[in-house]
Amino acid sequence: MGIDPTPTKSVQLSESTLRMLAGLDEPKPDRPNPKRTRATSTPAVRGPRPARVPDGMCGNGLHKMEGDNVRIGRRSGGRVTRECRACILNRTRSRRENQPRVTEPPASVPCIDCGGMIGVRVNGYSGWALAGEGGRCEVCADRPKAEKIIADHKLLPPEEQSKRTRRTALMRARRMLERVLDGGRAFHPGAPHGTSYAYSEWRCRCEKCSEARGVINQTYRDRQAMS
């Protein structure tokens, strides 16, 4: 067999192919090397390193972490933290000093649910404030919370309902629903009035129970201020 002497037809290239081939002969521009650019860049300016906290001191380096000054806290996941009580007290004091204080009792307004007049209460370091929340008296404002606690308790398994904390929460919720509005505050007719126990367990907010609770709170604040 020999070579076919018939001449072959020339191939016609498209315009896009011709432009691509013409671009191969053009000189390529110099591209920056990213590795070289990072290596020759100006290093970041860093400030002085913070002083090392001495051993046995709090994170601010102000108080010794020993004895009653150590506050043990538990976080999610079982983590245990150690906090400085003196630093916590200083933060609380500065926050209270910067908080505006209401020196005059506000005027009573009617409750948007029951229509009863809402009384005033002493709001800790902030001074005076209206009892209740959201325009509602204490009885109407706490009713949805107590009803939710009772409804959630019915959905718990029997072994969970028998726990002491669950039974205590259920008892408090039922007593909250038994309160009435008297003198603008929540009043429980069956509570042992004039005791801190009636304030915390019976949720009574009458004048005698509030005064008894206020004495305990003031004693705690005085003890914290002296420590």
Image (cartoon, helix red, strand yellow):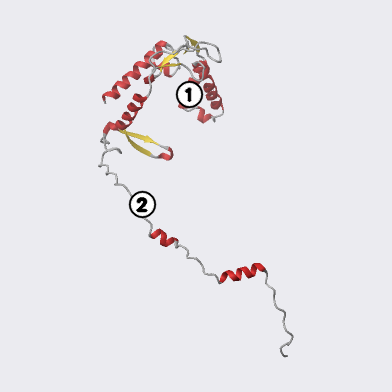
Viewer-side residue, 112 vs 202: 112
Q: Disc 1 designates what residue?
A: 169
Q: Tell me which residue sits at (52%, 24%) in the image.
A: 149
Counting labels gives 2
Residue 153 drawn above or below residue 138: below
Residue 53 is drawn in which quadrant?
Answer: top left
Residue 75 is drawn in which quadrant?
Answer: top left
Residue 133 drawn above or below residue 28: above
> In this rendering, does residue 150 appear at all?
yes
Q: Amino acid at mark 1?
A: Ala
Badge 2: residue crowd in 10 Å (few <14, some 14–19, many ≥20): few
For residue 9, which numbered disc appears in the image? none
Relative to residue 166, is residue 123 drawn left or right?
Answer: left
| Image location (x, y in percent) of residue 138 | 49, 16
Q: Amino acid at mark 2?
A: Ala
How far apart are the alpha carbons under marks 1 and 2?
57 Å
